[in-house]
Image (cartoon, rainbow, N blue to C red):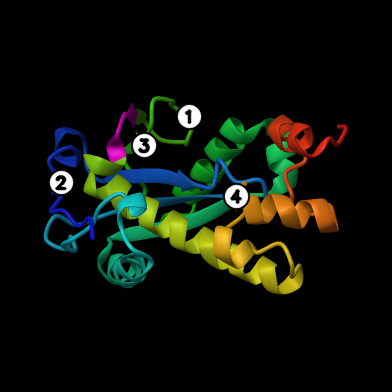
Amino acid sequence: MGSVNLGLELEQRHAQPVAGVDEAGRGPWAGPVSAAAVIFHPDQVPSGINDSKKLSPAARAALESEIKARALAWAVAFASVEEIAALNILQASGLAMRRAVDALAVRPAMVLIDGNRNFDLGAPSVPVIGGDGRSVSIAAASILAKTARDRVMVALDAVHPGYGFAAHKGYGVPAHIEALSRLGPCPHHRMSYKALRDRLGWQA
């Protein structure tokens, strides 16, 4: 399901080493936002890497292990619900990205960021629109960010049962809306999201 053979062509246009960075979890109504950074050695790129959204959970899990085993460096970081409220989701995503880059064991000479926004990541960086389908490093980062955040949401489901976090990962699906109407919010809901407050008639 959805595997491709992305290479390092985009990375090789820049000074080496190059890190790819992506986030996961901007849209959900609950939980942190995650980000990952990945640097590959040209001879150690796993096959089948693609945008995490185009891969099955089983494929993501298998590729996560292979990426971590073969990457020259990788790191995952988060920004909390409180930081999302204080900064807004865009800036909180940038904060998680900066934390991931800072945690890399190898300092990148260039960082490729998925999307159309640049952030201060402590190293030269450039946004790449559609990067998770063009850069193998960004696509690998998307997989690590997604799988790490999914595990957080499964853990939160055990702490706050009834919302269905393990199933929908905090997105505003009908089952989540119904659970919120019965239970109200938990501390991990993003009450800074106007859409969430409006949908349920809550005040800021």
Residue 37, position as x, y percentages in the image? 39, 50
Kindly indicate whether the residue at mark 4 contacts the one at mark 2 (C-beta within 8 angstroms). Answer: no
In this image, 184 relative to 155: left or right?
right
Magenta stretch: give its range: 127-131
Above or below, 145 relative to 167:
above
Point out the tag, 2 or 4, that comes first from the N-terminus: 2
- Res. 147 in view: yes
Q: Which residue is mark 2?
A: 8
The type of residue carrying mark 2 is: Leu
Q: Which residue is mark 4?
A: 173
Kindly indicate whether the residue at mark 4 contacts the one at mark 3 (C-beta within 8 angstroms). Answer: no
Point out the tag, 1 or 4, that comes first from the N-terminus: 1
Q: How busy is the neighbourhood of tag 4: few (under 14 within 10 Å), some, or many (20 plus)?
A: few
Q: Nearer the viewer, mark 3 or mark 1?
A: 3
* Separation of marks 1 and 4 at Cα, in angstroms: 30 Å
* 159 drawn magenta: no
**Residue at position x 66%, y 45% from top?**
29
Q: Which residue is mark 1?
A: 119
Q: Nearer the viewer, mark 3 or mark 4?
A: 4
Point out the tag, 3 or 4, that comes first from the N-terminus: 3
Residue sitting nearer the eye, 103 or 90: 90
Secondary structure state at the residue bearing disc 4: loop
In this image, 10 relative to 172: left or right?
left
Residue 147, position as x, y percentages in the image? 45, 62
Residue sitting nearer the eye, 144 or 44: 144
Point out the tag, 2 or 1, that comes first from the N-terminus: 2
Point out the tag, 3 or 1, that comes first from the N-terminus: 3
* Separation of marks 3 and 2 at Cα, in angstroms: 15 Å
